[in-house]
Image (cartoon, rainbow, N blue to C red):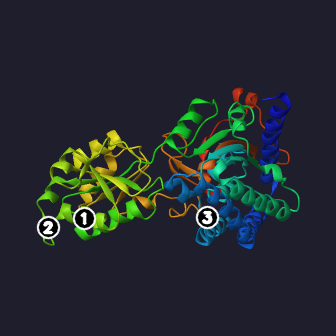
Amino acid sequence: MSESDNNIIIQYAKEAREGSHKLNTLSYPQRQKVLRAVAAALEEHKAEILEANQKDLAHAKETNLAAPLLKRLELTEAKLKTLVEGILSIAATENPIGRVLNAKELDNDLVLVKQTASIGVLLIVFESRPDSLPQIAALALSSGNGLLLKGGKEAEHSNAALHRVIVDAVHTASEGAVPKGVIGLITNRGDVYELLKLDKYIDLVIPRGSNAMVQNIQRSTNIPVLGHADGICHVYVHEDADIAMAADVAADAKLNYPAACNAAETLLLHKKLLETPYQGTTAAAFIVQTLKEKGVEFFGGPVAIQHKLADKPAESFHVEYGDNHMTVEVVDSVEAAIAHINQNSSHHTESILTSSPEVAQQFIAAIDSACVFQNCSTRFADGFRFGLGAEVGISTGRIHARGPVGVEGLLTQRWVLQPKNTVSGYATVGQFANGERNYTHKDVTSEFQK
């Protein structure tokens, strides 16, 4: 890359930083106005956006893009409607910036407050899914963060249309206070690797895409990375589960949207279900057959193959299919299910289907994943369904945000120290050292959270 090209990349990052600063100077009603304007603009320009998406879909079909990626690439009126609802939901929440987490009186005229704050500049790298762009943009605007976006080439036209609509709306609604550079769109693939070197300008990287892409980014940067590489989710059916419910939930977890990272990839069945009579067959066979009739194709573990629950053996228990394929295996107990999941899961989302509160709690306590459910589809692991408004991604890491990452995950914290008398009060460490003032360290959080 030439020096001039590198300077352009740095300029993108600087503009995003400046945009973050400008967002933080707006009142929250002003930022809410910006978010509502973005939602309205997406609705107003949906024909233009869908037309751009059709160009991407046509090219993707010509180049034989994989079916799961093609599904993620597609934008529809229904998807745009969901995006608009999500953005309006974000706009309706309380101000995430400056929220008091803790307040402590250091003495009778000095108060220390810990409050939420913007992270700064985020770099989001995502594949195939153009609907990620407005979700992420809305979360960044709400949380006061500047944003650099790099979408996949397969969504080039869709991303360009969405970006243009959003930055125009932001600039207009803020009456020019927030520059269009607050959200930068990177189109050159090679620029990503230059951006990953800019730890001086970029504060957090969030990759959304294939396992290979996420791991490549993690290896290529010193900037903190938030995200997940795999979506290998499990549904475990315990011996006491309601069988009709189990079949319904398992089918939803797999088939509601097979390409999603929260779709179930492995079905675990308690061994007693092989012997439990149900509607002329066994409970295990009924569940598997129900899913087969709905379009699921199973690969089996050794025990599942032995009991003819699948025709073909699974090559591995650590596979994210992203389509209608699914692994099925039989386990001896809830403890065996827990061990299997903790060994083979990507630590994204797992669900137990059981009527026993005790067994459910045992499972929930022992599973080492970001999301753990009882009698619910894994597809609930989603920022919109969690009431976060939208999500920037899902993190399986154990530091900072974990699970669906909404506005809260895009915030850090800072400390603000002020005298109660903000006109003439002041403090020095010397005043406390010489006994003129004494520390009280009294918790006064409740006074600031009213």
Residue at x 28%, y 69% (from the top left corner):
245
Task: Say what amino acid the circle numbered 1 marks.
Answer: Gln
Q: Quickly name the residue at label 3.
A: 75
| 100 in relation to 174, above or below | above
Asked if labels 1 and 2 touch by Cβ distance under 8 angstroms, the answer is yes
Q: CA distance from mark 3 to mark 1?
A: 32 Å
Q: Quickly name the residue at label 2.
A: 281
Could you say where residue 287 lies in the image, as x and y percent from the top left? Answer: 24, 64
Residue at x 38%, y 44% (from the top left corner):
319
Of marks 2 and 1, which one's residue comes earlier in the chain?
Answer: 2
Q: Quickly name the residue at label 1.
A: 289
Task: Say what amino acid the circle numbered 2 marks.
Answer: Thr
Circle 3 crowding by C-alpha within 10 Å: few under 14, some 14–19, many from 20: many
Q: Secondary structure at mark 3?
A: loop
Residue at x 12%, y 63% (from the top left corner):
276
| 221 in relation to 362, above or below | above
Residue 296, image quadrant = bottom left
Depth check: give the residue in front, 62 or 125: 62
Depth check: give the residue in front, 378 or 125: 125
| 429 in relation to 372, above or below | above
Q: CA distance from mark 3 to mark 2?
A: 42 Å
Asked if labels 1 and 3 touch by Cβ distance under 8 angstroms, the answer is no
Of marks 3 and 2, which one's residue comes earlier in the chain?
Answer: 3
Q: CA distance from mark 2 to mark 1?
A: 10 Å
Q: Is residue 331 visible?
A: no
Task: Say what amino acid the circle numbered 3 marks.
Answer: Leu
Could you say where residue 214 lies in the image, as x and y percent from the top left? Answer: 55, 39
Residue at x 19%, y 60% (from the top left corner):
284
Circle 2 crowding by C-alpha within 10 Å: few under 14, some 14–19, many from 20: few
